[in-house]
Amino acid sequence: MSSIITLTLPGDPLFTEVARQTTTSVASLLTGENHSASDETQFVHDFELAVSEAFTNSVKYAGEHDTPPTVTLSFELEKRRLTVSLLDANGPFSIETPAPDIESYPENGYGLWIIRKVMDSVTYRREGNSNIISMSKTL
Amino acid sequence: MKTILAFREEEFAWSHEVFSCLHPLLLPLCNKPFIEFLIDFAILTGSTAVRILCDGGINPIERYCENGSRWGIALSYGSLHADDSAQILLGKNRKFCGEERIMIVSGFSFIRYDKRLDYKSLASSLPEGEWAACPGGSITLSGAPEKPPADGAAAPLSLMPLDGMASYYRASMEALETGADRYVLPGYGGEPGCAIGRNVVISKSAQIRKPVSIGNNVQLLGDTIIGPSAIIGSNVIIDRESSVESSIVLDNTYIGEHLEVNGRIASGNRLNDPRSGASISMEDPHLLGSIKKSQTLSALPRKVAHALAALVMIAVLAVPFLFLWPLLKLGGRWRSAQIDCHSENPGETISLGKVELDATNALGAIASTLSLDHYFRLFRVLTAELALIGSTPLPAEAQHPNAPANALAYRPGVFSYAEAEQWPATGDDAAIVERYHLVHSGPISDIGLVVKAFVNRPHEKSSA
Amino acid sequence: MIITETSANGIVIVALEGNLDALSAPKLRGSPPVADPKTAIVLDLEKVDFMDSSGLGAIVGAAREKDDPACGIVLSCMNDKVRRTFETTNAQRLFHIFDDTAAAVDFAATRQIART
């Protein structure tokens, strides 16, 4: 009962906006019966934020190879659950990140932490030369 | 008139330690979240808009209160610094305040008020400045009075700081005893001093002694004694022959058999003594005892019964399975994935296949009705990795409040007790039903429940 | 992203419009009043629709460079979405946040007088 949408974008920060807008349109398709408008708004926003972070990371660490980098997003829609996966060909990384020590005014290192905070579950796996980070949340 | 509610994290740091799963502003006093008392009071003073400020995270409050439409007011949120003066708060919220008179309620304190009194004209006529105060809390008014002062009415208002478990306990009991006369409290009750929520099952032999307040989805089993002065939250089971007196039982708590809870705050598996501040993990001997028994003495008959029943199901479902599975598989309507779940033994995981069926398809619908998505799992019962009926398997990755480390009882099964009871399978609610059956169910009643689960599952799916 | 600079009461107001993300964050860091440690500014976020951690990092990083990190950048008029990004990381603790730009300017001006 689920549908899958995939989208491959060039690994360039210019396309972050496209990734985000696609995400918000897809996330808006989910509507719960017992949920208020503000739950739905927050659900859409959480995905917008998480995808923006994940896409930015993919783009940031791309460029160590010859072919132009790409990022593939796939959206798996279930009745009340959305899973967004990002696939890129960068080097492996870990999604385990400590909470940023905000009092020392850090300029970087919030991205993965935000993703894990706003999503229900985040998994990472390495397939061949690709990274796949999957983020899902139930409305 | 508008109201600003200002909180500093430091004021309720104690609550994070005692009630870690709950945002302190949502801590229930007599089954009503703390913040709602303040919102009610703001409304009594004639406020049309309320802004909640805190120097820490308030997302849980936002999710609970939303935009205030439930109360017919506008609710908004913001942040502050712990050392901000009232003047700075007014500046930081200048757009919100506009030209109106502002009441600032500052601090984590319980406001004693009386809903029958006219705070509206008082709030609009009192001179600027402090209205009421207590250590760590205050109510101040700013902006010129909207009306001439009323004739010297004393302010029937006082504040009580909630600075620890003891004061939280006192405030809760006070709200219970003054009852629905002074505050708006949840629950129905034919007589004063007794408020009962929805879906409450009270055994014939249970006794209820006023005053009590009981939440939603509560089961009071045989020979329990509730009250006097008992506050029972939602999703609570009080097991046989236990008594709860002068105590607070918070949401999602299971009180085992033959327990005497007096002058305590029970929350999850913790039992707190509000007077001494002591807090122990309530691994109550009776509840644990019966789980132990089921693990050693009755485990074998249970496992045998489950395995036999599983064999029967495997045999009966083999024909439809062998017919439907290849068709669904070929049609791409049988999608499966492996997930790691917590096993019955703490710290271990088992890998389970998770199958998703497309029930919009006729064959898929038949397969779903026959629970064929669980077919492979039935074999795991034969190897005793799964029970035939038990808890819903919990994914190992998720940090869940009901994870085996926190829960009192957990035994993953092919079917779950929550399915048998057609309980909405959402988190804590379902877990409490499952815990109940894990403790009380025997091999024979398990088989009955499997049949119920088998029959109920498709309904649940189609209505979901 | 469009960056507009105005000033009032001796305080520079930097108004942003658009999305504050990895694409636009360097532009914000490069803006002279934002980068100058001595200039206390009010950052008007009213027209920022979306902000992610790159945008947040730019604001936090710029504040760190200020002589007075706590008051060097005063924030005003953020929408709920942006506010949530701040709260997810607890970064709201680092800033004074106003719902009105004029009030933020008044605050920044008093703080500047107090320091000099």
Image (cartoon, coloured by chain):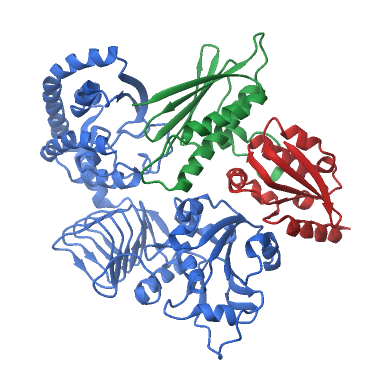
**Left or right, residue A99 beside residue A134:** right
Please state which of residues A32 and B4 is positioned toward the viewer in this rendering.
A32
Please state which of residues C21 and B338 is positioned toward the viewer in this rendering.
C21
Please state which of residues A45 and B12 is positioned toward the viewer in this rendering.
A45
Image quadrant where residue B234 sits: bottom left
Query: In the image as oriented, which residue stretches furthest toward the right?
Result: C116
In this structure image, what is the colour of chain A?
green
**Depicted B259 relative to depicted C48: above or below:** below
Percent x, y for residue C27?
77, 34
Image quadrant where residue A131 sits: top right
Percent x, y for residue A81?
41, 33
In this structure image, what is the colour of chain B?
blue
Percent x, y for residue B322?
18, 14
**Depicted A36 relative to depicted A26: above or below:** below
Residue B243 can be seen in this image: yes
Instruction: State which quarter of the image contains the C terminus of chain B.
Output: top left
Residue A96 can be seen in this image: no
Q: Residue at x 35, y 43 (%)?
A: B427
Which lettered chain is shown in red? C
**Depicted B11 relative to depicted B270: above or below:** below
**Left or right, residue B77 beside residue A137:** right
Percent x, y for residue B352?
32, 24
Q: Residue at x 53, y 88 (%)?
A: B153
Query: In the image as oriented, which residue stretches furthest toward the top?
Result: A66
**Left or right, residue C60 beside residue B430:** right
Instruction: State which quarter of the image contains the N terminus of chain B.
Output: bottom right
